[in-house]
Amino acid sequence: MTCFSGITPSGGATLGNYLGAISRWARDGRPGDLYFVSDLHGMTGAYHPQRLRARTRELLATLLAAGIEPEQLFVQSDLLPQLGALTWILECSCSFGEAARMTQFKEKSSAKGLEATPVRVGLFTYPVLMAADILLQGADEVPVGEDQAQHVELARTLARRFNGTFGDAFVVPRAVTPPAAARVRDLADPSRKMDKSARDSVGVLYVMDPPDLLRRKIRRAVTDSLGRLEYRPVEQPGLANLLEILAACTGKPVREVGAGFGSYGDLKEAVAEAVVDELRPVRERTTELLAESAELDRIRARGAELATARGAHRLATAQRLAGVG
Ligand code: AQP
């Protein structure tokens, strides 16, 4: 059983990514599970090459710093020749209608403010690249939220179609619902999730933010004027977000974690210290790994070698069955 998860370097890792994904991967993952930095997925809109490269490296270091085993990790673009080949084979069996049905494409391509940045063909075809990511590694379980479930369904359809038309080459994957995790919201606008590519970072806590910056952002978090220190997500979303963060960092139940605080200010101080304590080890270790440049290069190269080897026979079989190469 191989479970497969990725993280896109569209920004630095946030507290949301850390509590909702990275720390759980490190803590609850099984030895055969695989994790990757999906830098190719970070190219589907306007992007800055040097920033993409630097963030990819930083995310790889953060995943390692969180405790994910090096042999379970790789960077997507290190498999570019294999993924490019497989994506083409899969694209040639994916209908235009299937790709055009993807809700995420429809939403992202019609979002406001895109006039200056035309929609890329890559945004349209990246679900097929995602299918290639999954099928090349032979993953059978892909934990995804609702927004990505349709893409895993496409990977499943393409695997079945290929196996049925040309012969068995691929494991047929399935989307699984990840265990319920903290859904961290933006501190400045709790109606939105905390997003690493947010335009305005005042409400976003980054793993690599220094402690004083984390404290400042948390002190400025939006709450309300009701003065009721209770967990009421609908009526008091900002306060509920802070309580959820404190609960996730301390391991205490969210309905109990607010007891004993005299004011929102006191609660914010406690949240700030809990977040600083939670992120300190991973930030420090990430910084060390980034400084140990040769060691990070070695780990990355080994990850690429293992991932390439895992996919080699599947790609060779697919090419042979498809009549190419
Ligand atoms: N706010 C969040 N709370 C809990 N979990 C979160 N995740 C993301 N944001 C939160 C989880 O992090 C993993 C990797 O995310 P991704 O890179 O696939 O992109 P995403 O889900 O779209 O996350 P972002 O940070 O919001 O990225 P951008 O800005 O690129 O859209 C996933 O497991 C995700 O659930």
Image (cartoon, rainbow, N blue to C red):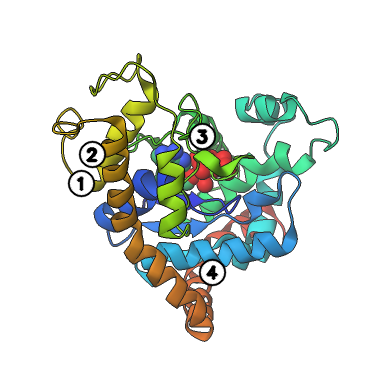
Of marks 2 and 3, the one in the foreground = 2
Q: In this view, does 286 lie to the left or right of 89?
A: left
User: Residue at the location (72% across, 59% down)?
Assistant: 324
Tell me the distance, in whole angstroms, between the alpha carbons under discs 2 and 4.
40 Å
User: Residue at position x 20%, y 46% from top?
Assistant: 250
Residue 123, image quadrant: top right
Residue at the spot 39% in from the left edge and 36% down from the top edge: 184
- Please tell me which residue lies in front, 325 or 44: 44
Residue receiving disc 2: 247
Residue that badge 1 annotates:
250
Q: Which of marks 3 and 4 is nearer the N terminus?
A: 3
Q: Does the residue labelled 3 lie within 8 Å of ligand 1?
A: yes
Q: Residue lying farthest bottom?
A: 294
Residue 82 in the figure: left or right of residue 118? left
Question: Where is mark 4, residue-wise?
Answer: 308
Q: Which amino acid does label 3 sit on?
A: Gln
Measured Cα–Cα span from mark 2 to mark 1: 5 Å
The Cα atoms of the two marked residues, 4 and 1, are separated by 39 Å
Whole-angstrom CA distance, mark 3 to mark 4, is 24 Å
